[in-house]
Image: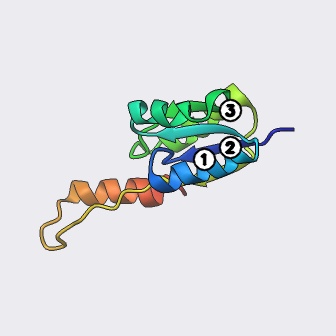
Amino acid sequence: MTRHVLLTGATGGIGTAVAEAFAAQGTFLTLSDHDPDALRVTASRFGAGAATLAADLTDPRAATVLVEEAWAAHGPVDVLVNAAGVYPSLDMARVEPAAWDRLFAVNLRAPV
């Protein structure tokens, strides 16, 4: 039985490397990222062994919807890899609240 991996942040360096490692094991991948165009490019490397689901993890409902859609389309998710993350260069004295909100939404709230 082929395992099903759901991978967020699939278009970044870490996400792509993780996808390649799982693909080499014959794992089916559901790849997710906020950028649908970059997501299609990344998924094209894996052919029929991958599907895509774009998601904006700053939306509090996005993580739940992502898992539900991956499960509905491709069966139970055996492995979840949270590689999504934002790492902006911030001047701590001048950072806008919206920048903090995005950082916490993607890096903390979405994985939890």
Sequence order check: which comes first, mark 2 or mark 3? 2
59 in relation to 41, above or below:
below
Q: In which quarter of the image is residue 66?
A: top right
Q: Give how far across and how far down residue 94 sits, in percent.
A: 12, 67
Task: Tell me the SS state at disc 2.
Answer: helix
Which residue is more in the foreground, 109 or 25?
Answer: 25
Q: What residue type is labelled 2?
A: Ala
Q: In this view, does 87 lie above or below 69?
A: below
Image vertical order of residue 17 relative to residue 2, above or below? below
Which label was assigned to residue 19?
1
Residue positioned 41% across, 39% down in the render: 34
Q: Mark 3 points at which residue?
A: 49
- Neighbours of disc 2 within 10 Å: few (<14), some (14-19), many (20+): some
Q: Quadrant of the N terminus?
A: top right
**In the picture shown, does residue 56 fall above or below 84?**
above
Q: Do the residues labelled 2 and 3 touch (CB within 8 Å)?
A: yes
> Residue 68: percent from the left, percent from the top?
63, 34
Q: Which of 86 and 100 is in front in this view?
A: 86
State which tag comes first along the sequence, 3 or 1. Answer: 1
Is mark 1 in CB contact (under 8 Å) with mark 2?
yes
Q: Distance between the residues labelled 1 and 2?
A: 6 Å
Give the CA distance from mark 2 to mark 3. 7 Å
The x and y percentages for residue 55 are: 46, 37
| Amino acid at circle 3 | Gly
Left or right: residue 40 compared with residue 98? right
Q: Where's residue 99, x and y in %?
A: 25, 57
The mark total stands at: 3
Q: Name the residue under label 2.
A: 23
The secondary element bearing badge 1 is classed as helix
On the rendered structure, is 103 left or right of 60? left
For the residue pair 34 and 14, the one nearer the viewer reads as 14
